Every structure is written in structure tokens, then in C-alpha cells.
Amino acid sequence: MDITLVRGDITEQQVDAIVNAANSSLMGGGGVDGAIHRRGGPAILDECRRLRASRFGGGLPTGYAVATTAGELPADWVIHTVGPVYSATEDRSELLASCYRESLRVADELGARTVAFPAVSAGIYGWPVHDAARIAIGTVLSTPSQVVEARFVLFTEDAYQAFRSALAAV
Ligand code: AR6
């Protein structure tokens, strides 16, 4: 699998699937989640509502992932995953790693070969970006899958530099 890093907006990526840093409700929010629903249009929220009604009545648990249409986005699918809120007192790294593993598992189920990831949990959920980058890259590299390109799409220069350092360190 090739790991690529780009500075940019995940909603513009021409890949098979993009990953959304969602919340358990699957009903949208701010950050990358807000951008994906805004640009992708109402078809994404419609499918999220159906998933809530059918499979995830209590919400999508932290560390899980589930796919929907990508609506009007260039990608074919959105894989929604719920990152952990950062805690300085409790180690939640395993939950963050699970977001990447589960997203790749769902990508394999879909037959997606190119997947774009944001820095899950590194925004509103407060995860220090260097640590988030290390977990993201380490997990994707150590997870067997059929995905040929995992593209990390970093919105800020800080996040981009953190991912560059994490990739250089493996
Ligand atoms: N493309 C790529 N990355 C982006 C974009 C974009 N268009 N917009 C923001 N980022 P966040 P979280 C970066 O806050 O920390 C939502 O309300 C951002 O700079 O989107 O997992 C959800 O509904 C940061 O590096 O996600 C949840 O309630 C990274 O994406 C909560 O936020 C993740 O930041 C999830 O918080």
C-alpha cells in the first residue's frame, strides 16, 4: 500500500472512498464532518438516518466505521468513523487505531482501492496532532487490506508537517 500525504480539502479528493471524522449520532457536525455533508448534499444524511433506524439505534460506537453514498462528492463512498475525544488521563489510542483499521475493513468490503483519510480526532476532539499522526500512519501501515493508496488529506500546515514527520519516522 502506498501512503500519500496532501495538504488540502478531503471533499475534493478523486478517490474511491473518503473517511469522515463523524460523531456517534451520524447526524453531521462541524469540522470535516460539516464540510462533507455540506458539499455532498442531503443523500448522505438520508442514508445516515436509515443506518440509525436499522443498525445503529444507539449511535455508531467510538472506533467503528460504516459506509454511505458520497452524494455529490467526487468519491463513490463516505466511510464514517467515530474517533475518541482526547483524554490526558486515559489512554484511548486503541480506539483511535480502531477507526483506521475499521475504515480499511469497510473499504475492503466495498472494493475501494483508493481511500482518503482526515486526521481523525485531531480537531474538535482535541487529539495532539503529532500523536494522532503517529497512530494513524502506524495503524494504516500495519493493517492488511486491498487498498492500494491511503491518502492522508491534511487541512492545516501543522497537521501536514506532523504527518510528514510521522511517515519519516517509520
Ligand atoms: N478536509 C480535510 N480535513 C479537514 C477538513 C476538510 N475539509 N476540515 C477540517 N479538517 P474535526 P474530530 C481537519 O474537528 O477532531 C465534528 O463536529 C481538521 O483540521 O473535523 O474527529 C464531528 O461531528 C482536523 O485536523 O474532527 C464530531 O462531533 C481534522 O480534520 C467532531 O467534530 C479532524 O478535525 C469530531 O472531531
Image (cartoon, grey):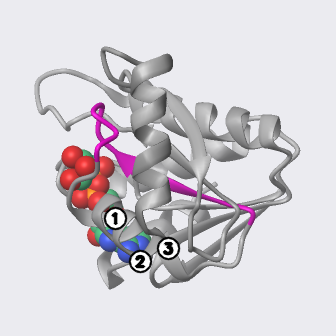
Q: Where is residue 87 in the image (x, y as percent from the top left)?
A: 15, 32
Q: Which of marks 1 and 3 is nearer the N terminus?
A: 3
Determine whether the beta carbon of the residue marked 2 sits less than 8 angstroms from the nearest atom of ligand 1: no
Estimate how packed mark 3 is, as few (under 14), some (14 to 19) or many (20 or more) residues with alpha carbons within 10 Å. Answer: many
Q: Give the range drawn in magenta.
A: 16-27
Q: Position of residue 37 (x, y in %)?
A: 37, 63
Q: Real-space Cα distance between discs 1 and 2?
A: 19 Å
Q: Quadrant of residue 78?
A: bottom right
Q: Which residue is drawn at 44% across and 47% down?
A: 46
- Is 6 displayed left or right of 122 in the figure? right
Residue carrying label 3: 10
- The answer to whether one can see residue 72 in this image is yes
Residue carrying label 2: 161
Q: Is residue 78 above or below residue 51?
A: below
Camera-side residue of 55 and 126: 55
- Look at the image and tell me in which quarter the C terminus lies: bottom right
Q: Are marks 1 and 3 in contact (CB under 8 Å)?
A: yes
SS for tag 1? helix
Q: Which amino acid does label 2 sit on?
A: Gln
Q: Which residue is drawn at 49% across and 57% down?
A: 43
Q: Nearer the viewer, mark 1 or mark 2?
A: 1
